């Protein structure tokens, strides 16, 4: 027997039916009916301090768990504040369902208080969006939103719900299973001929090279990636989105490729004859100048989104499908072929691995350690050591993000959380809260720069109030470091609006939020400070003052080719000579 | 270069916005766009003419296809298709020019759909170039007010075997080559 139920209650029941464990949100006028239901409902709601961070937190949750993250905001400013997070999720293919309130149907278009065209504004910020004006469509719309967000190439879906829908009542009928959406088809399995083509491609490769991205993590294909790398004895380079897909300790892992990637990864991609691109989108930060990227290679590209194949680089073989499903089929055929025909190209491949090893040893990530200054790279090494590859590392955007990507160690996927595509500052701290919410047993580090930290400052209140034991490490160099680095290298050191002065005293700041905090500036203090942070059962704010003008290397200048890679800072000119 | 795109989309609020959004987000200027319901009332068909860098054409089709409300997107730019457009033309015409005007309209198979002592309104359909030619001519007769529908395009029906045989017998090779293969 179904009974009368309000739209607000149907909404919450529908979220629960989709497996929602937590909603990150901020209330307002038109969402009052939803918050009235939440008042005594078991569904957990985390009250953030700014709607943008509700979306970032939902992303952190989704990235750390693989489940759909849910955030909620009111109409008008609440909804517009979500949009940065939505675009972030769109760029990185993260499954999010965002619920926004809308002014009553009858007031839409009359410039009502807190009215904004959320449906129109978020059109380009979402994978898909809905405006619900009929209560009888609400339950099914929520089901569809979760379905679209979590299937195919995942992404953010927004459901804008008018206030009259929330307060009116109807017979509640739970949503039906979605069997088909006419405008939305997903191809997961490769065709048999495609598998054979891929097999041929891999079989004849002499210098195979795997370029693995976020799609490997989204499809849960870590085991298959490792197996492919081992069967082919191919090196695996990762995009900034793919870190953790292969454990950092795996012998075939050659770190990140691209603008701040490793020498070996960038030399490797230049020399390979068979580029195996898995769940990647040939982003400009990876490829540099496109015509100089993998110039000697044929390309096998696997992605679930047909629009990715040939977008930036035309593949010789393009397979639309789920990376995990495709790899399973291909590996199966590879193994059978290997059993019947034996290995081929064993010698060239052994030589190839040797060359890769040589490049790794020739130019590992390196920096000059100092005793009286904390080098940012040293800080990252210390955090990696402390975490033992087990912690979740959520970072913000900028220099610290790149150093963390270079030096951090991960034992598995979904431990590395960053704003890869959009590069949204202010992401790291709220994303860490969401990750902690989804993985309460894990240690979560939020590694942020002093710039990004100031953008997410109000969330210290959310962290303190909920007791999220996030270990916040501020890599504090007093600058907007990445912008300063570009000004140094490309704008003749004219440091324009990049100085972050007036930074708060961290001990006092932490204390005022009721959490522990400390500032360190000498390398010798770092071990103990990190140990203290780990020992603290609650949140911890560790402000680490690092060398102010350290730059991230290697670096391929924007639009440059891999062979224009700058490995080291220019040697200092000694005065007096 | 102008690209001719034919779409079938779900007849839902926002579907047009999504398609137009993909184009406008890239700074493309839409030359024309027609949209109306199909035989299946839950679907709409759209024809869009848009100025697109040729290198971006196939990507654009894929990105439009990716939209959740889009059932099918086809690039008809180089396909064998029927592409027609309609125009309504109101022309102020002096009494002594009226019969000449009607003869001219007849050549273009334009119909008079409204008449007043000082003007005619003509309805005409056909290829865009034909409409251009008529409009150019009509300028000689008086002041013009005009509205065009924009292009409506449809892929040519596949050729049947018997039709092909007939064309072969008649030696009309070009038409066979131009036809869509079954």
Image (tube, coloured by chain):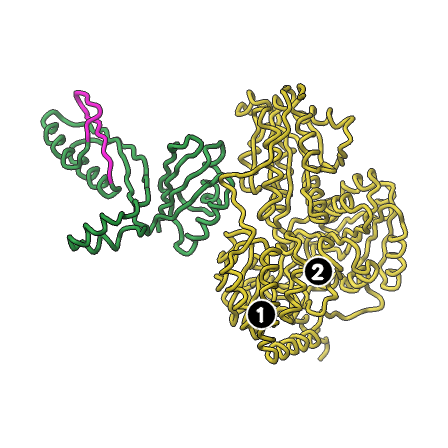
Are the residues under badges 1 and 2 in a single subunit? yes
Rendered image quadrant of residue A341 = bottom right
The answer to whether residue A241 of the structure is visible from this angle is no
Chain B shown in which color? green
Marking on residue B108: none
Quarter of the rendering containing residue A41: top right
Q: Is residue A183 rendered magenta in the image?
A: no
The label on residue A337 is 1
Residue drawn at the location 66% of the way across and 75% of the way down: A359
Is residue A116 found left or right of A440 in the rendered image?
A: left
Mark 1 or 2: the one toward you: 1
Mark 1 Cα-neighbour bin, 10 Å: few <14, some 14–19, many ≥20: some
Residue beneath the point at 19% across and 51% down: B167
- The stretch of residues the image draws in magenta is B111-126
Image coordinates of residue A317 in percent, x first then y, are: 50, 62
Up/down of B60 relative to B8, above or below? below
Q: Chain A is drawn in which colour?
A: yellow
Toward the viewer: B178 or A112? B178
- Point 55% across, 32% down: residue: A117
In-front residue for pair A268/A369 = A268
Disc 2: CA contacts within 10 A as few (<14), some (14-19) or many (>=20): many
* Left or right side of A577 for A371: right
Residue pictured at 60% horizontal, 26% vertical: A162
Judged by its main secondary structure, the magenta piece is strand
Q: Residue furthest front?
A: A340
Residue B77, x across and y down, in percent: 34, 49
Q: Which chain carries label 1?
A: A
Q: Does the magenta stretch include residue B124?
A: yes
- Of residues A377 and A93, the one drawn nearer to the viewer in this rendering: A93
Residue denoted by label 2: A405
């Amino acid at each position: 027997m179904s009974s009368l139920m309000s739209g607000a209650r149907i909404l919450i029941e529908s979220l629960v039916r989709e497996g929602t464990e937590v909603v990150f949100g901020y209330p307002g006028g038109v969402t009052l009916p939803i918050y009235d239901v939440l008042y005594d409902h078991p569904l957990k709601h985390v009250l953030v301090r700014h709607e943008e961070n509700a979306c970032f937190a939902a992303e952190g949750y989704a990235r750390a768990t693989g489940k759909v993250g849910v955030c909620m905001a009111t109409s008008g400013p609440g909804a517009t504040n979500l949009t940065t997070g939505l675009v972030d999720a769109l760029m990185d293919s993260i499954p999010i369902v965002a619920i926004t309130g809308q002014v009553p149907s009858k007031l839409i278009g009359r410039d009502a208080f807190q009215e904004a065209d959320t449906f129109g504004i978020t059109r380009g910020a979402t994978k898909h969006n809905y405006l619900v004006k009929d209560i009888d469509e609400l339950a099914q719309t929520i089901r569809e939103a979760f379905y679209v967000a979590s299937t195919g190439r995942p992404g953010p879906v927004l459901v804008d719900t008018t206030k009259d829908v929330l307060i009116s009542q109807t017979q509640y009928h739970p949503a039906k299973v979605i069997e088909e959406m006419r405008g939305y088809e997903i191809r997961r399995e490769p065709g048999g001929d495609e598998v054979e083509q891929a097999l041929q491609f891999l079989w004849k490769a002499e210098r195979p090279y795997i370029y693995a991205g976020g799609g490997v993590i989204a499809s849960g294909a870590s085991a298959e990636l490792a197996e492919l790398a081992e069967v082919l004895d191919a090196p695996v380079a990762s995009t900034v989105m793919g870190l953790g897909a292969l454990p950092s300790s795996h012998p075939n892992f050659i770190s990140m490729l691209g603008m701040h990637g490793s020498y070996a990864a960038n030399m490797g991609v230049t020399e390979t004859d068979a580029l195996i691109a898995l769940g990647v989108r040939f982003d400009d930060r990876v490829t540099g100048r496109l015509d100089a990227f993998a110039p000697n290679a044929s390309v096998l590209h696997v992605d679930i989104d047909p629009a990715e194949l040939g977008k930036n680089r035309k593949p010789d073989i393009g397979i639309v499908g789920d990376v995990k499903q495709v790899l399973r089929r291909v590996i199966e055929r590879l193994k059978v072929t290997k059993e019947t025909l034996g290995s081929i190209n064993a010698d060239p491949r052994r030589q190839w691995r040797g060359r890769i090893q040589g490049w790794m040893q020739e130019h590992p990530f390196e920096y000059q350690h100092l005793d009286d200054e904390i080098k940012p790279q040293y800080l990252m090494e210390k955090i990696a050591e402390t975490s033992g590859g087990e912690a979740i590392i959520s970072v913000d955007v900028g220099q610290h993000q790149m150093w963390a990507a270079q030096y951090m160690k991960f034992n598995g996927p979904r431990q590395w959380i960053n704003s890869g595509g959009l590069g949204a500052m202010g992401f790291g701290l709220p994303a860490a809260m969401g990750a902690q919410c989804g993985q309460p047993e894990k240690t979560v580090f939020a590694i942020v720069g002093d710039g990004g930290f100031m953008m997410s400052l109000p969330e210290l209140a959310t962290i303190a109030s909920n007791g999220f034991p996030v270990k916040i490490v501020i890599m504090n160099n007093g600058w907007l470091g990445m912008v300063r680095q570009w000004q140094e290298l490309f704008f003749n050191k004219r440091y324009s609006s990049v100085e972050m002065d007036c930074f708060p005293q961290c001990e006092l700041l932490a204390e005022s939020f009721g959490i522990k905090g400390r500032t360190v500036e000498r390398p010798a203090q770092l071990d103990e400070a990190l140990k203290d942070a780990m020992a603290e059962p609650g949140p911890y704010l560790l402000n680490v003052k690092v060398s102010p003008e350290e730059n991230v290397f290697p670096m391929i200048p924007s639009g440059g080719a891999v062979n224009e890679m700058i490995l080291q800072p220019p040697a200092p000119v000694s005065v007096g000579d | 270069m102008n690209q001719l795109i034919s779409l079938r989309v779900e007849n839902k609020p926002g579907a047009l916005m999504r398609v137009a959004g993909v184009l406008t987000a890239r700074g493309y200027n839409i030359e024309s766009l027609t949209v109306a319901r199909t035989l299946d009332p839950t679907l709409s068909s759209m024809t869009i003419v848009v100025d697109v860098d040729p290198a971006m054409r196939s990507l654009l089709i894929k990105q439009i296809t990716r939209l959740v409300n889009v059932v099918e997107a086809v690039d008809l730019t180089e396909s064998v298709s029927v592409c027609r457009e309609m125009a309504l033309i109101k022309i102020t015409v002096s009494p002594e020019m009226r019969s000449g005007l009607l003869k001219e309209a007849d050549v273009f198979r334009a119909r008079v759909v409204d008449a007043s002592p000082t003007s005619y309104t003509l309805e005409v359909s056909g290829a865009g170039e034909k409409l251009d030619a008529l409009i150019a001519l009509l300028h000689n007769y008086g002041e013009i007010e005009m509205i065009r529908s924009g292009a409506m395009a449809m892929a040519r029906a596949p050729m049947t075997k018997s039709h092909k045989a007939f064309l072969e017998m008649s030696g009309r090779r070009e038409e066979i080559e131009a036809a869509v293969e079954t």
